[in-house]
Image (cartoon, rainbow, N blue to C red):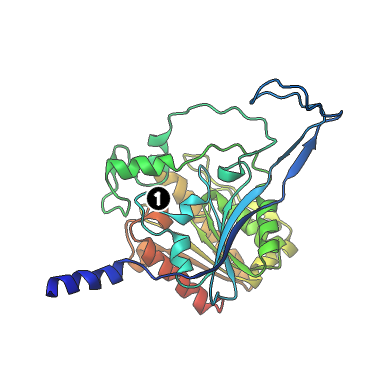
Amino acid sequence: MFQSLLIWLLSLVTAGTPVVIKEQGAFTVGGTMLQRPGVYDNAKFVGWSEQIETGQSYRADHAFVDYQIPVRARKNSLIFIHGFGGDGVVWQMTPDGRPGFATLMLEKRWPVYIVDLPGRGRAGRTTATTTTKPVADEMFWFDIWRIGVWPDYNPGVQFPIDAEYLSQFFRQMTPDLSNHTLDADATTEIANKVGNSILITHSAGGMPGWMAAMNSDAVRGVAAYEPGGFVFPDDDMPDKIDGLTGGVAPVGVPREQFMKLTQIPIVMYFGDYIPDTVSDKLGDENWRVRLAMARHFADAINKNGGNATLVELPKIGIYGNTHFLMQDLNNAQLARLLHQWMAENDLN
């Protein structure tokens, strides 16, 4: 009897908070349409994968967004922007089936909008001329994303160290069919369509986030998880920081545009295994230089009257996080940190 009661109580703790959804759906934003000249002839058949294009159209280059809005939703929505090599699924779930960041925030009554940027995932229809081919690169990304130095996992890592998890993790990667010129405009259009919102960005999604925050009045805040690039006023930029993977250079924008970032709260989160000194390891160096530039970025925001916080997780006693913080074993703890930051900045 006692054991059955204990099991029931534990199930309540681990099952998560029930969520009642008021509305859910999907839509596309932006994009182009190619229209071939001539008149379409519906009597001609060439094949399923080959077409006579005369008179036909082709819609592409849009972003895909799916969303869920809970009952008693909070005043601001969360827009999740993914990084390089993936799509919005990284925010929705973990490779071993734990609730993803979007679900964890949905449980706290945040409306969530999950984005697949143009040329990725469900937005794979593109006008970019690309060649896709199998490239064996998983060991490289294992290192770059600070899971470890192949074949060894980092000590104390929050990434599950079993072969099945690693397989599922890499299988969530998607082909990149984008020309990488559409991400910022797509993110801006999404923010304008959704309305009052907080951008939650990851890695290469950081730069589209900064651009959208400068270009859309709907953006109320930005939470960036290990952003890969940074903007600065073009009359006051730091030097490029060199490193083993090419380093990181500041991106200059007009001061008037940059000042828009000083009008909203900004937080950046960086995980573990990032050294302060030069290293001969790819992952170490890639994120050493980006963390150093993030410090310059936070300083630039704050010295211009803004509100930017840089959180280096090991410095607040949270250890073991990889580049994929939102899927690490302690992602629920990190989601609570984000929720707390939004509450402290009156964003909820």
Which quadrant holds the C terminus? bottom right
Q: Is residue 275 left or right of residue 112?
A: left
State the residue lying farthest toward the top.
46
Residue 287 vertical placement versus 107 (above, below): above
Give the residue displayed 60% in from the left and 36% down from the top. 177
Give the residue displayed 75% in from the left and 43% down from the top. 32
Q: Residue 49 sits in which quadrant?
A: top right
Give the residue displayed 23% in from the left and 71% down from the top. 8
Q: Which residue is mark 1?
A: 277
Q: Position of residue 304 (x, y in %)?
A: 64, 70
Mark 1: amino acid: Thr
Q: Position of residue 137 (x, y in %)?
A: 43, 33
Answer yes or no: is residue 233 visible.
no
State the residue lying farthest toward the front.
43
Q: Secondary structure at mark 1?
A: loop
Residue 311 vertical placement versus 240 (above, below): below
Front position in the image: 24 or 304: 24
Give the residue displayed 77% in from the left and 40% down from the top. 33
Front position in the image: 194 or 319: 194
